[in-house]
Amino acid sequence: MTAVNFVHIMDFMIMMPLGELFMRIFDITPRQFSTIVSSYTFAAGISGFIGAFWIDRFDRRTALLWTFLGFTIGTFACAFAFDYFTLMLTRALTGVFGGIMSALIISIASDIFPFKERGYAMGILTAGFSVAAVAGVPFGLYLSNMFNWHAPFLFMGAFSILIGIGLWKMMPSMPASEQGKTSTPLEVISVIARDKNQMFALLLGFTIVLGHFTMIPFLAPYLIRNVGFDESSIPLVYLVGGGFTIFTAPWVGKMTDRYGSLRMFTILLLISFIPVLILTSLPMVSLIVGLSVTSFFFIFGSGRMIPAQTMITGAVSPATRGSFMSFRSSVQQIGTALAALISGFLVYENADGTLSGYFTVGIVSVVISAMSLLLARKIKIVDQD
């Protein structure tokens, strides 16, 4: 599951550091680039919503293999996009399968691990995000610099084929629950809508993602244009920051299991506001200072996701977990898409090429993220047996 999460996250993340390159090659504006990013997440949100009606009816292995196949095809298609519109369409195609796949990953991990060990499981899955940042994104940027922007998508498509073969050979069957087999779409919606606990969990996932991802689309362009980073230095941001989180994510998972998800979420969320506000107002600084700030942003930004995910998985019983997680994925993908659009409206280019409005993005990120703390306190953990 961590390998699947790795390629899924890398496929999404690789667009961010390539933003400057895409804006130049396709001669598009920051707002148009944010539209490309949001096309993936809007498509993932829609597919996650539709997938919620059938995801619990099928064997987890079968569902994951088919969605991963579609994801792989979509990734290859991105490599052959020839203009702004075809790239947006192929990103949307990839997102259709990526949204359901994301829900399946969390559902499978939650099915396997009891709640008292689930924080550690979420930490390991988050490490897939970190490995994507440390190895995947820098390597993708290296391929882009050495060849062209098509190369990272070709690499991810080929790597996805290898992972797909591994899933087919190694993943055991995980039959659907009896309740999932008989539930109708109306029943799925009504169960979630009537349960305040599940609604609070969905809103928590939405706000934490919306707050975090407003920062991401213009992170690399801001570092290049305002902070003074070279384009060749951007891989270091992900290499160093992601390198730290490979070690901190499992540790946060263990601390979540030991001290409780709400306590760890509160601590990490409040600390995360500091690097957000510093990063979005960062002037011209040395590479070392810039990497220090971005690394703290990575550590606490990804760290707060782990106890949040743990609480969300505990808000629903195992019988309907797949459907709920698909709704969760849909809601969070929509949050990611809205985040890209919000940052696209707030950030604008100055006459000298620098970007303005990024500090406003930081303020918005903090305010939205602070709302998630109020929601987290309303969530109750239900019986996980």
Image (tube, grey):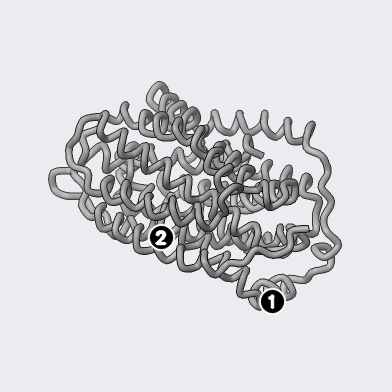
- Residue 369's disc is 2
Nearer to the camera, 211 or 151? 211
| 194 on left or right of 374 | right
As drawn, 75 above or below 118: above
Give the amino acid type for the residue marked by disc 1 in the picture: Ser
Residue 151 showing in the rendered view: no
Residue lying at the far top in this picture: please name it.
Answer: 146
Q: Say which quarter of the image contains residue 128.
A: top right
- Residue 190's disc is 1
Nearer to the camera, 121 or 210? 121
| 189 on left or right of 350 | right
The spot of residue 372 in percent (x, y) is 46, 63
As drawn, 295 above or below 49: above
Residue 59 showing in the rendered view: yes
| 208 on left or right of 227 | right
As drawn, 201 above or below 5: below
As drawn, 248 above or below 305: above
